[in-house]
DNA sequence: ATGTTAAATGCAAATAAATATCATTTGATA
DNA sequence: TATCAAATGATATTTATTTGCATTTAACAT
């Protein structure tokens, strides 16, 4: 039974990339913050605790690499920076975001009604669909008052 | 029976904003390019044909204003800039995007199965949902070959 | 173990999109 | 037609991200 970390190592090896300390440490930050939607700057700050010598450019490069390897995926909450979250292979496809239009808070919903929808869209269009992304906009509990 | 343009004028007046030539011309660009997803730079280039004196900052400011007035809405195709499309009041809510992961082409789907989904999500979470946004990722007809 | 080599890093400089500043102009109303 | 807040254009600035390059390091072969 392969852990998430084993998968990272295998994916890196398969593509001829090296498993560096920096990549380990960045990976750990995502493991330790699975409920978060981290920006490059936030990752940088957290990584510096364990590995102060790291450069911001390395963080950016690593995030790109991890995204390419499907280790993390990119989110967009329109707040001026990219955000990323760990791909645990269980959150994918039925894990979407609720964005509060008042305070900007983002929460999660676990729901999967979209498989039917994908089929329908594939029939109507000529696209071969492999993924979807759903965002809901509204007002969170606190901001409804 | 009120035209889209009348609505723009009313909305501006209501909030104490002025109907300037620049705003008219930018609005016309959206009317003339309803199928497009325009970036600020693209709007700027098109506007300059009719109104060469316009400044890029005015385009940015106008796009923000139009978005605030729900005259246009913002899209994100992760290509390094904001993109906008006209809100015709008919495309809203059942108009979503198919993004080709190979060539980046974006097409439209008209579909609305999400009302049920919104209800379900509202029950499960404490969010009051007012809008949703769906993107499908896959391969377009040309790139499947 | 050690040497070799391509890949990765850190730093600093460079880009690019978007925003802010401010003197000047303009649209709406009296 | 005069008034005045709002809007504009030009330019400078900010902020996120990327790039160039000399140096370091992980992976692999010997």
Image: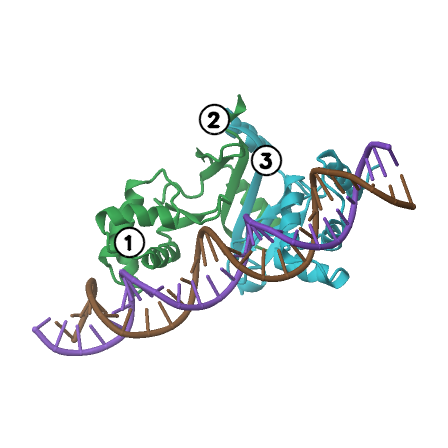
Chain colours: A cyan, B green, C brown, D purple
Q: Residue furthest top?
A: B145
Q: How crowded is mark 3: few (under 14 residues within 10 Å), some or many (20 or more)?
A: some
Q: Quadrant of the N terminus of chain A?
A: top right
The spot of residue B61 in percent (x, y) is 35, 59
Give the residue at mark 2. A124
Q: Residue at x 76, y 44 (%)?
A: A19
Please name which of the two marks, 3 or 2, marks the residue nearer to the observer.
3
What element does badge 3 sit on?
Answer: strand
Q: Mark 1 lies on which chain?
A: B
For marks 3 and 1, give the CA distance. 36 Å
The spot of residue C11 in percent (x, y) is 64, 61
What element does badge 1 sit on?
Answer: helix
Give the residue at mark 3. A131
What element does badge 2 sit on?
Answer: helix
**Which of disc 2 and disc 3 is earlier in sequence?**
2
D17 horizontally vs A27: left or right: left
For marks 1 and 2, give the CA distance. 34 Å
Tag 3 and tag 2, C-beta contact below 8 Å: no
Q: How crowded is mark 2: few (under 14 residues within 10 Å), some or many (20 or more)?
A: few
Is residue B141 in sight in this rendering?
no
Q: Are labels 1 and 2 on one chain? A: no
The spot of residue C20 in percent (x, y) is 42, 69
Q: Which chain carries label 2?
A: A
Between C1 and B108, the one nearer to me in the picture: C1
B10 horizontally vs B67: left or right: left
Specify the quadrant of the image occupied by residue A10: top right
Give the residue at mark 1. B8
Between C20 and B133, the one nearer to me in the picture: C20
C7 horizontally vs B100: left or right: right
State whether residue A110 is above or below residue A121.
below
Please name which of the two marks, 3 or 1, marks the residue nearer to the observer.
3
For marks 3 and 2, give the CA distance. 16 Å
């Amino acid at each position: 039974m392969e852990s998430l970390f084993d998968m990272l190592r295998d994916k890196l090896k398969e593509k001829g990339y090296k498993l560096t300390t920096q990549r380990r440490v960045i990976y750990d930050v995502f493991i330790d913050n699975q409920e978060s939607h981290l920006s490059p700057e936030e990752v940088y700050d957290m990584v510096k605790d364990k590995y102060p010598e790291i450069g911001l450019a390395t963080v950016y490069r690593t995030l790109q690499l991890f995204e390419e390897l499907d280790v993390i995926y990119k989110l967009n909450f329109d707040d001026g920076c990219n955000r990323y979250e760990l791909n645990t292979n269980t959150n994918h496809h039925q894990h979407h975001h609720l964005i509060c239009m008042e305070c900007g808070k983002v929460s999660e919903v676990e729901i999967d009604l979209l498989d039917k929808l994908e089929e329908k869209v594939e029939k109507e269009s000529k696209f071969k669909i492999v993924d979807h992304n759903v965002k809901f906009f509204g007002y969170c509990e606190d901001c409804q008052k």
